[in-house]
Amino acid sequence: NGADDNASGTAAVLELARLLATEAERGAPPACDVVFALWSGEELGTLGSSHFVESLAGAGKLQQKVGAYLNLDMVGHLDDALYLQGIASSPVWPREIERRNVPVGLPVATKADPYLPTDVTPFYMQGVPVLHAFTGAHEDYSTPRDTADQLNYDGIRDTARLIAGIARSLA
């Protein structure tokens, strides 16, 4: 059914966009563009994100066009921790995560390794700092039991709030 993989990430991205748009309407727009994108084909080899990176990179260096890539994939089962992966891709991540999590208060576990089998890979391979939010694998993953009634909606909202704070700070 795909409620967690990856409707939860899609919902979190939409909430993130809503939060930043609300701030902009209140007179606090970001200083630079923030692009919201949803990919397809990750399990087939990051097809959507790879196409985006290849198209955007063109003749120039992608890191001159994209300051950072924040990825939300399977964020619907927040229990023990929100896993933030790829923090070794930028020295700003540890401080930003800590600062932006103060008002949200999520249990966060970080992982340095930026080599992940997800949509962050095409960005990282082009030198773009990446941060991947994930609430962990579970027994319903890729089964018909991955249904909306299994999701932690408060956790999805709070994950979006944390990532919005990081995005706002970067922008």
Image (cartoon, grey):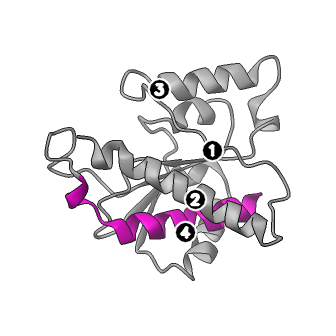
Q: How far separated are the C-alphas under marks 1 and 3? A: 17 Å
**Quadrant in which residue 28 is drawn:** bottom right
Q: Which mark is residue 110?
A: none
Q: Residues within 10 Å of mark 2 (few under 14, many from 20)?
A: many
Task: Say whether disc 1 or disc 3 marks the residue closer to the N-terminus.
Answer: 1
Q: Residue 19 in the image: x percent, y percent?
A: 62, 65
Residue extent of the magenta highlight:
148-171
Residue type for callout 1: Phe
Query: Which residue is pictured at 61% across the width and 73% down the height?
Result: 100
**Distance of label 4 from label 1 (alpha carbons):** 15 Å
Q: Earlier in the sequence, mark 4 or mark 3?
A: 3
Which residue is under mark 2?
A: 16
Q: Main secondary structure of the magenta part?
A: helix
Q: State the SS at label 2.
A: helix
Instruction: Calculate the distance from the C-alpha at mark 2 to the C-alpha at mark 4.
Output: 7 Å
- Secondary element under disc 3, as helix, strand or loop, is loop
Is disc 1 placed on a helix, strand or loop?
loop
